[in-house]
Image: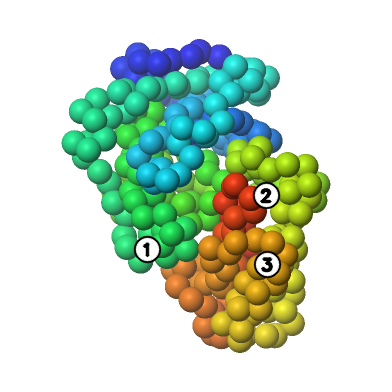
Amino acid sequence: MEIFTDKDLLQDSLIKQKLSGKTIGFVPTMGNLHDGHLSLVDIAEQKCDLTVVSIFVNPLQFGPNEDFDAYPRTLEADQQKLEDKNVDYLFLPTTNTIYPSGMEKHTKVEAIDSLTNKLCGASRPGHFLGVTTVVNILFNIVQPDVAVFGKKDFQQFMILKRMADDLCMPVDVIGADILREPNGLAMSSRNGYLSDIEKDHASHLRANIIAIQKQIEAGDSNYSSLENHAKQQLTREGFKVDYFNIVNQSTLEPATPSDKKLLIAAAAWLGQPRLIDNQEVNLM
């Protein structure tokens, strides 16, 4: 595995590979890698000749009261996991590499409000502006043929796919299914903030989503009532609920009884970490 901190050297190497006919798969991450991240690497390796992984904790997507400074950084362990996966290139940019003029003066890339102003975007203003800006920069450096993102962050995946389409980027943005702990909890770098007892209890978020899914599939289309019931149940179980919404998969707008492709999306705090999860529901 070749490791680069200089974007120009990385780009020069990748351009030579592309000129020789190689295809490039890309997995952008913020590190603290777990099996969920590694499943994205597997997909990139299946789709392309070469795989690039980046590790960059992007300050632009963190709010002023969020956990940027405390975000877990485990570079040595991450490198070993990627070596074991036979990743070809690891890109380790610094903040100065990504934002050489400083974040405040850097050109930003903003996705459409209809995808960014709801769900996680409603409670984390500016978050998705940071995500689309940094991914745009990374895409321009790496110039991948395929980029893989986990669908645990379903809204993020939809936003980045729309960004690539709208800006005519020659990259296929692929969404990968959620990998889960044995108790059903979606794998996340922030799960490390949970105690063993909290991690076990966190599985109730998934359980509530599945319970609502079963009610929808049984024919209940009173989505507002289902959402309220789930919020009340999670609150009783000790969660601080951010949102629990049933939306149209494509638009992320509130679902209507005529919609056939739905998404149950939830975010809630349990102790320190804010947990997110979702479930696609296809009524055909």
Residues under numbered marks 3 and 2 in contact, where contact means CB atoms less than 8 Å apart: no
Asked if residue 164 shows in the view, the reply is no
Residue flagged by tag 2: what amino acid is it?
Answer: Ala
Q: Residue at x 31, y 60 (%)?
A: 112
Q: Residue at x 34, y 20 (%)?
A: 7
Name the element at disc 2: loop
Identify the residue at image location x=60%, y=38%: 189
Q: Which residue is mark 1?
A: 117
Where does the image place residue 240, in percent across and percent down from the top left?
A: 60, 61
Which quarter of the picture shows residue 62?
Answer: top left
At label 3, the amino acid type is Leu
**Picture quadrant where residue 41 is located:** top right
Do the CB atoms of the residues marked 3 and 1 lie less than 8 Å apart?
A: no
Q: Which mark is residue 186?
A: 2
Q: Residues within 10 Å of mark 3 (few under 14, many from 20)?
A: some
**Of the pair 143 and 204, the residue shown nearer to us:** 204
